[in-house]
Image (cartoon, rainbow, N blue to C red):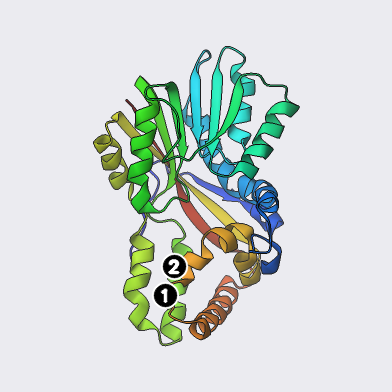
Amino acid sequence: MVAGEDPPDGHDAVLPGLRLIMLPSDAIMTTTKDAKELAYLYDLFIVPGWREVFDRLVDDELKIPGKIRVLDAGCGTGGFAVDLAAKLGADSEIIGVDESDERLALARGKAEMQKLSNIEFLHGSPAATAQADNAFDLVVGDATMTPPEQIRSVLTELVRVARPGGTIVLKLTTRGSFDEFFSIYWEALHDTGHDDLTPQLESLITERLTISDAETLAKKAGLHRVRCVTRKERFDYADAAAFFSAPLIESSFLDHWMAIVPNEADVRQVSQKLHTIIDREREQMDFDVSIKATLVMGQK
């Protein structure tokens, strides 16, 4: 198994609040939900347990001056952009882009509630913002759930829309995220006679960029004075059922993880073993998993 990198500052934050967002697996992010409902569920469950982890890291690491033009690429339901617009005031301009029109509608509603005139939400994505070249003093991009092979395209786009001398911040998860689960996954595959899937599991473990990889990619994209900040964030789940039915896990990661198992019967077998191991190992304590929340920062 491949070990993840420890954060340089040794910070280890615990997020017990995720225990409050557990729902049955048929109650969240299913194909029976329409796009508007999915956006509400995203705002209610994914934003507090995931996005705000990275937003807090940006707040801690950046001192953003007034009279600035900011792009929030992949803004989701707009919480970070709205807070920034309120803090910076009317002399600054904030534009948020997201590929979900329904999430954008929620973001616009938040801005309207605060009567903000210095913010606009438009359709786009971190890899295709639809914004002009050299247009922003600060560009923040969310690649926390972006497939690793697409991160280069995201960085290229963020650099394109930043003005010369402007700051680019990329949010992502780096190598070592969810290692606690992957260790148990390896045991479950072994116990169910699926040792032949070990190479595929190793690919899952190593698919995220290392911090060194992220720095190299940023430099190749044209960034200068590149630095990375990583914080280990730990999520607590009451038991196996809570973990597997958590909206964050079920809607965003589980299908990808289980895709290495060849058929539905094997998936059920491995899943049952995963439940057994998690509940056995935790010994009446919470099941903890962690991510490496990382910012890659630099100047154009």
Locate residue 160: give its quadrant: top left
Label 1 and label 2: CA atoms lie apart by 6 Å
The kind of secondary structure element at disc 2 is: helix
Residue 86: quadrant of the picture: top right
Tell me the quarter of the picture where residue 202 sits. Answer: bottom left
Quadrant occupied by the C terminus: top left
* In the foreground, 80 or 195: 80
Residue 180 percent coordinates (x, y): 47, 64
Q: Which residue is mark 1?
A: 186
For the question of whether residue 227 can be seen, the reply is: yes
Marks 1 and 2 in Cβ contact (< 8 Å):
yes
- State the residue at coordinates (41%, 73%): 260
Give SS at disc 1: helix
- Say which amino acid is labelled 2: Phe
What residue is drawn where x is 36% and y is 46%? 151
Query: Local crowd at mark 2 within 10 Å, few (<14), some, or many (≥20)?
Result: many
Q: Residue furthest right?
A: 113
Q: Amino acid at mark 1?
A: Trp
Q: From the image, tell me which residue sits under label 2.
A: 182
Is residue 32 shown left or right of residue 255? right
Q: Which numbered dot is residue 6?
A: none
Location of residue 17 in the rendering, given as x and y in whole percent from the top left corner? 67, 51
Q: Is residue 115 left or right of residue 96?
A: right
Q: Is residue 6 left or right of residue 233?
A: left
Foreground of the two, 148 or 157: 157
Where 51 falls versus 69 (above or below)? below
- Quarter in which the N terminus is drawn: bottom left
Give the residue displayed 68% in from the left and 59% down from the top.
33
